[in-house]
Amino acid sequence: MRAQERPSYIDLAIIAPLAAAAALCAALILPVLWTAITEIDLKPKLTYQACPSLSDGAARLNCYDRVRRNSLSPAKYERPS
């Protein structure tokens, strides 16, 4: 065997830990990136300011209902009716 040649198992011993480290880094970063991407809402949020511009009364009321439904989080403790 010449001095420049290395056995293939040595190459594998060098490449395998590097590949494992890259996979570990990807496994740690991907959930954070996925959450950030899915949390970004590309469409504009519906706000109360958009509702008065609707001329139809039923559509305007529906707009207010949609804004209220989308903006309020459920109550922690619900009072009995």
Image (cartoon, rainbow, N blue to C red):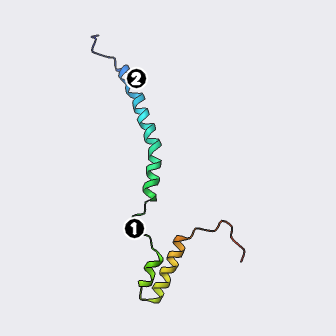
Snapshot quadrant of residue 7: top left
The residue at the point 53 percent across, 70 percent down is: 71
Instruction: Indicate the amino acid at tag 2.
Output: Ala
Q: CA distance from mark 2 to mark 1?
A: 49 Å
Q: Which quarter of the image is occupied by the C terminus?
A: bottom right
Residue at the spot of label 1: 43
Snapshot quadrant of residue 49: bottom left
Q: Which quarter of the image is occupied by the N terminus?
A: top left
Where does the image place residue 70, in percent across and percent down from the top left?
Answer: 51, 71
Q: Residues within 10 Å of mark 2 (few under 14, many from 20)?
A: few
Is 46 or 17 nearer to us in this picture?
46
Residue at the spot of label 2: 13
- In the rendered picture of this protein, how many numbered marks are placed on residues? 2
Where does the image place residue 52, in percent across and percent down from the top left?
Answer: 44, 84
Q: Are marks 2 and 1 in contact (CB under 8 Å)?
A: no
Where does the image place residue 35, in percent across and percent down from the top left?
Answer: 47, 53
The residue at the point 41 percent across, 69 percent down is: 44
Is 55 or 1 nearer to us in this picture?
55
User: Which residue ends up furthest to the right in the rendered image?
Assistant: 80
Residue 40 position (above or below residue 11): below
Q: Of discs 2 and 1, which sits in the foreground?
A: 1
